Each structure stands twice: as C-alpha cells, then as structure tokens.
Image: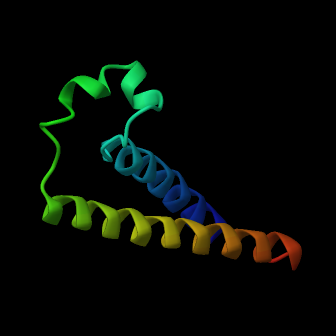
Amino acid sequence: MTRILKVFLAITSAFLILLILMHRGKGGGLSDMFGGGLTKNAGTSGVAEKNLNRWTVIIALIWVAIIIALGLMYKFHLI
C-alpha cells in the first residue's frame, strides 16, 4: 500500500510543480528574471487562469492527503 502511495506522491509532486510553473507571474519576482516580464500582455484569459487555479488547489489537496496518509502509516507502524 505504501508503495502505491509513494508512486502517487511522486506523480502528484511532479504535476503540482508543473501547474505552479504554468501560473502567470505577477511581476517583480523570479518570473521576470527569466523573461516573464516580456510576455506581460500575452497572459492567459480569465477562464483559463481560474481553471488552472482550481486544478492547482485540487492536486495540492490530494498531495497533502497522501502525505498525511503516509505519515499515519509510519506512525502506527502499518508499513
């Protein structure tokens, strides 16, 4: 069971990183350092940004649930 959760943890971690990197920079941060300021006017539409935010929150909640489940398994020696 823990192997399955660890695989899902790795997949959700990678997917969460990709989703976070897809967000538009708000300016003045690391995104501007790597050329994010050049595409300021070519941002995503409002609907696409909302959907990206929703997916990021959903994947983050799944990621947290997996972390908690693995922690409880380790705590109660269910491994």
Q: Is residue 78 left or right of residue 18?
A: right
Where 46 sits versus 18, above or below? below
State the image coordinates of residue 43 (x, y, percent, origin top left).
17, 43
Of 57 and 33, nearer the camera is 33
- In which quadrant of the rendered image does the N terminus lie? bottom right
Where 24 sits versus 75, above or below? above
Residue at 47 percent across and 28 percent down: it is 30
Residue at 70 percent across and 69 percent down: it is 70
Q: Is residue 69 left or right of residue 11?
A: right
State the image coordinates of residue 71 (x, y, percent, origin top left).
77, 70
Residue 46 lies in what quarter of the image? bottom left
- In which quadrant of the rendered image does the C terminus lie? bottom right
Q: Is residue 34 left or right of residue 67?
A: left
Q: Is residue 38 left or right of residue 9?
A: left
Residue at 42 percent across and 20 percent down: it is 33
State the image coordinates of residue 11 (x, y, percent, origin top left).
45, 53
Res 79 seen here? no
State the image coordinates of residue 5 (x, y, percent, origin top left).
58, 66
Res 54 seen here? yes
Residue 76 lies in what quarter of the image? bottom right
